[in-house]
Image (spheres, rainbow, N blue to C red):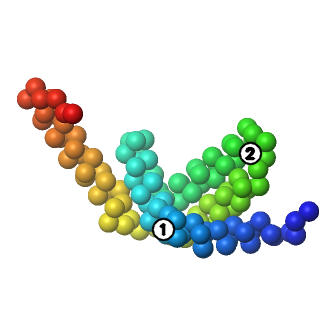
């Protein structure tokens, strides 16, 4: 049996070490995810909500499969990121919601223009 708090220590090591070197800062990563989800859902999604929904994803995995410690580890990490970094008002990076939404709108206008002129895109 593990020592009480061992999972929390592992979650801290994960979110402050290896995962940051793989995926960058959680603020930047979750802001990008929030931007894409906002476009897809057609409503604003905050980076904190990304952390919360990813936690729910892990909880669903815990209930639908044989329990794996990794799901608990990841859920603790997502909640820690949300609590420690995302309770304040969000700060969007240059690749955040506004930039992606503008690019999406520009691309849609271009596609609609092609359709009006009878052109097909490859």
Circle 1 sits on which residue?
24
- Name which quarter of the figure residue 119 lies in: top left
Circle 2 sits on which residue?
62
Q: Which residue is drawn at 10% across and 26% down?
A: 118
Q: Left or right of 39: which side holds 85? A: right
Q: Residue at x 44, y 65 (%)?
A: 28
Mark 1 → mark 2, Cα distance in angstroms: 26 Å
Q: Which residue is drawn at 91% across and 62% down?
A: 1
Q: Quadrant of the C terminus?
A: top left
Q: Residues within 10 Å of mark 2 (few under 14, many from 20)?
A: some
Is residue 26 in sight in this rendering?
no
In primary-sequence order, the first of circles 1 and 2 is: 1
- Name which quarter of the figure residue 12 lies in: bottom right
Q: How crowded is mark 1: few (under 14 residues within 10 Å), some or many (20 or more)?
A: few
Eyeballing the image, is 17 above or below 32?
below
> What percent of the width, then of the height, locates residue 25?
49, 69
């Amino acid at each position: 049996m593990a020592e009480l708090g061992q999972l929390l220590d592992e979650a801290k090591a994960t979110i402050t070490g290896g995962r940051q070197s793989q995926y960058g800062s959680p603020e930047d990563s979750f802001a990008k995810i929030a931007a894409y989800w906002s476009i897809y859902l057609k409503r604003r999604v905050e980076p904190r909500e990304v952390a919360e929904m990813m936690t729910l994803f892990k909880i669903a995995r815990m209930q639908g499969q044989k329990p794996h410690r990794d799901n608990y580890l990841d859920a603790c990490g997502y909640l820690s990121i949300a609590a420690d970094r995302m309770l304040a008002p969000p700060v969007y990076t240059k690749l955040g919601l506004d930039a992606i939404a503008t690019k999406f709108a520009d691309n849609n206008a271009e596609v609609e223009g092609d359709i009006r002129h009878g052109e097909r895109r490859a």
